Amino acid sequence: MAKKILVIDDEPKIVEICSDYLHAAGFDIITAGDGLQALALARSQKPDLIVLDLMLPGMDGLDVCRSLRRESNVPIIMLTARIEETDKLIGLELGADDYITKPFSPRELVARVRTVLRRASGDSSSEVIRVGDLTLDRTRYQVNLPDRTVVLTMTEFELLATMMSQPGRIFTRAQLLNAVRGVAFESYERAIDSHIRNLRRKLEPGEYIITVHGVGYKFEG
């Protein structure tokens, strides 16, 4: 069955281009032109991934992302014309899995969609990883502490799985980017810090992820 993609943008031409390329790549497409319509469709249609413009009328993309993350872990790729890095990082901290800056190549969008969906589908070869009192199950896409299940976004899950697979190893930001995206983009390295902050908050009160100043991060059980 084809994966369902919700494309949200108030520019009809961008919606048309994104829809045409994604449909040609084998996806089913639904579209929305504002934030409130987007939320209604996300709740009723249950898309497999959302392409979300940051600048929307009525309810902007950040508010849409914030609302979605209260009730769903559906993968989200942000589209943004904003060049300020802080805007992109805010979106990532709210739980977006990736972002693309306008103008962008439609082929790049298709590639990003496939990459994020591939991460979301999990990789059964890694099976279960246990470090200390934390358990990560790749077959079930589940992370557990002794007293609770930890709910993560796709990107957070892949980052944690990468670090847990080699406890004590120091990963640079570029290496972590390569692990979750398949290719390292220098301009995205600050985004790793946002995802790590989210991971630490969700794993509290334990101190599992250690910052190695000037280098990167490592996982300690």
Image: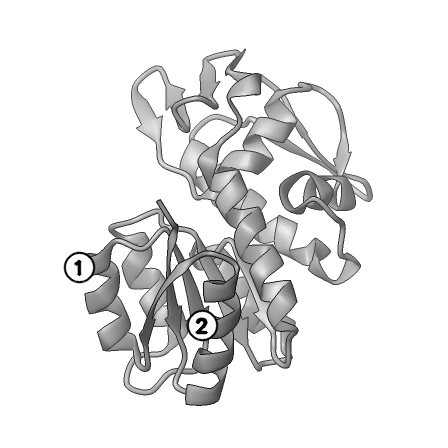
Q: Could you say which is closer to the camera, residue 202 or residue 111?
A: 111
Q: Could you say which is closer to the camera, residue 148 or residue 27?
A: 27
Q: Could you say which is closer to the camera, residue 22 or residue 146?
A: 22
For the point 39% across and 50% down, the residue is 3
Q: Residues within 10 Å of mark 2 (few under 14, many from 20)?
A: many
Q: How many marks?
A: 2
Q: Could you say which is closer to the camera, residue 202 or residue 160?
A: 160
Q: Quadrant of residue 64?
A: bottom left
For the point 31% across and 55% down, the residue is 47
Foreground disc of the pair 1, 2:
2
- Residue, disc 1: 44
Amino acid on which the number 1 mark rests in the picture: Ser
Q: Quadrant of the C terminus?
A: top right
Determine whether the residue tagged by mark 2 lies in a helix, strand or loop.
helix
Q: CA distance from mark 1 to mark 2?
A: 19 Å
For the point 63% across and 50% down, the residue is 193
Q: In the current view of this chain or complex, which residue is farthest to the right?
A: 214
Determine whether the residue tagged by mark 1 lies in a helix, strand or loop.
helix
Q: Which mark is residue 19?
A: 2
Q: Residues within 10 Å of mark 1 (few under 14, many from 20)?
A: few
Q: Quadrant of the N terminus?
A: top left
For the point 45% across and 76% down, the residue is 54
Amino acid on which the number 2 mark rests in the picture: Ser
Q: Tell me residue 148's x, y (percent).
A: 30, 23
